[in-house]
Image (spheres, rainbow, N blue to C red):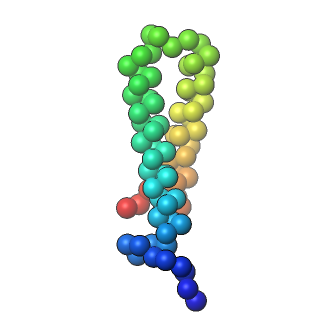
Amino acid sequence: MSLGPVVLGRPVPWLGLQLLAGATVAAAAAAATSAWRHRRELGPGDRVRLGLALASAVAFVPWAAYWGLLIP
C-alpha cells in the first residue's frame, strides 16, 4: 500500500495542511497585533468583524492541535 510521495516522513498533503495551519495561526497573531496597535482607529463594524475572525482563530488552535497539525 502506497501513501504517495513523502517528505520529511509525512505525506505531502498532510505537510501542506500543516503549513496552512501554521500560516493561519501566524495571520491571526498578526491581525491581533495590528488591531491592538490601531484599536482607537477601528469603527464598531470593524471591531465586530475582527472579533469574529479572532474568535474563530482561537477556536481553530485547539482543533488543529488535536489533529496534530501544529506539531512540527
Residue 44 vertical position relative to residue 3 in the rendered view, above or below: above
The residue under the point 47% across, 64% down is: 15
Residue 21: percent from left, percent from top: 49, 52
Residue 52: percent from left, percent from top: 60, 30
Pick the residue in front: 1 or 39: 1
Pick the residue in front: 21 or 13: 13
Q: How many marks are shown on the rendered structure?
A: 0
Name of the residue lying farthest toward the front: 5
Q: Which quadrant of the rendered structure holds the C terminus?
A: bottom left
Q: Which quadrant of the rendered structure holds the N terminus?
A: bottom right
The residue under the point 56% across, 11% down is: 43
Residue 30: percent from left, percent from top: 41, 33
Residue 45 vertical position relative to residue 13 in the rendered view, above or below: above
Name of the residue lying farthest toward the bottom: 1
Residue 52 vertical position relative to residue 62 in the rendered view, above or below: above
Q: Is residue 34 left or right of residue 56?
A: left
Pick the residue in front: 29 or 5: 5
Residue 45 vertical position relative to residue 16 in the rendered view, above or below: above
The residue under the point 55% across, 85% down is: 2
Residue 7: percent from left, percent from top: 41, 73
